[in-house]
Image (cartoon, rainbow, N blue to C red):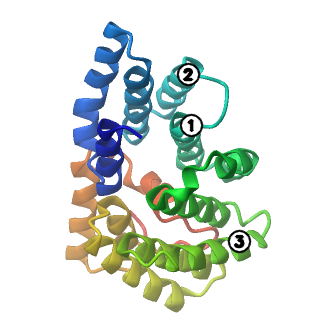
Amino acid sequence: MCIRDSCYNTRLWLGELAEIGRRAPAWARSGERVGDLFSWVTGDLYSAIVELFEDRPSEARTRASLAIGRWSRNGFHLQHWLALKVTVLCDLYEGDAESANARLSQAWDALDESGLLRMQLMRIDALLLRGTVAIASSRKDSRRLVLATRDAAALEAEERPAAQGGAALLRAGVAAARGSRTAARTEYTIAARELSRAEVRLHAACATLSCSPSEEDSARALAVLTGEGIVRPERALRVFAPVAGLSLIHI
């Protein structure tokens, strides 16, 4: 992972979609102009994530597909992970949790064998996404909630605020899917606190919106989402704080 890509990944964790939207397309264009395939492909993949939250999932899918089509088909690299992540997020955003689950499950062995999960941030990212998908798709198979609980425990073991917040977010989703409102609200509150502490702003805002906040807290959380260019916050919740079955909030 180069320094520049590391900066974009950090911005993504911090929820700085607007800044990524300003910088990533120029990075991609610059890469295309000088024949820097890494910058062209990676810049386009980050741009696709921004397009998704601008409520343009079809364009995001197309951009990601074209970008990864220019990349090597050998091995499993960071670019393959980003392209996979874009399409899985698009599935969640559009409410197609089954496709998200099938897509991620099919690619998981390649991700595991790639060595990318040896990096803690990558491991946290992947575990949180897998647990999120398991919860979102658990209506069809409730056994997936057990898998999400395991991913929550794995995140807890990472002993970092972002991981602790992610673990609480998954526990909240599991509790909500099982119909336990009290437990879900408690875990969402913990998630909002820990994720705010780690400055993981979009996940924190969605956790806040999911724990029956006051009108003031709700408005503040929505402002975080819309301030980063998220056009449909209710769909962002499918990505950042999914619940299978029980809705705790209304936007």
Report helix, strand or loop for mark 2: loop
Q: Give whichever of discs 3 and 2 has the lower sequence position.
A: 2
Residue 251: x %, y % from top left:
38, 62
Going by the image, does 247 lie left or right of 39?
right
Residue at image mark 3: 147
In this rendered view, identify the residue nearer to me: 85 or 51.
Answer: 85
Going by the image, does 31 lie left or right of 154?
left
Look at the numbered discs 1 and 2 and tell me whether their residues touch, using CB distance below 8 Å.
Answer: yes
Residue 77, numbered circle: 1
Which of labels 3 and 2 is toward the front?
2
Residue at image mark 2: 71
User: In the image, what residue occupies the spot 37% across and 31% down?
Assistant: 47
Residue 12: x %, y % from top left:
34, 49
Which of labels 3 and 1 is toward the front?
1
In this rendered view, identify the residue nearer to me: 17 or 44.
Answer: 44
Q: Give whichever of discs 3 and 1 has the lower sequence position.
A: 1
Q: Residues within 10 Å of mark 1 (few under 14, many from 20)?
A: some
Q: Could you say which quadrant of the image residue 20 lies in?
A: top left
Identify residue type, mark 1.
Answer: His
Going by the image, does 58 lie left or right of 76?
left
- Is residue 207 placed above or below 183 in the rendered structure? above
Residue 4: x %, y % from top left:
29, 36
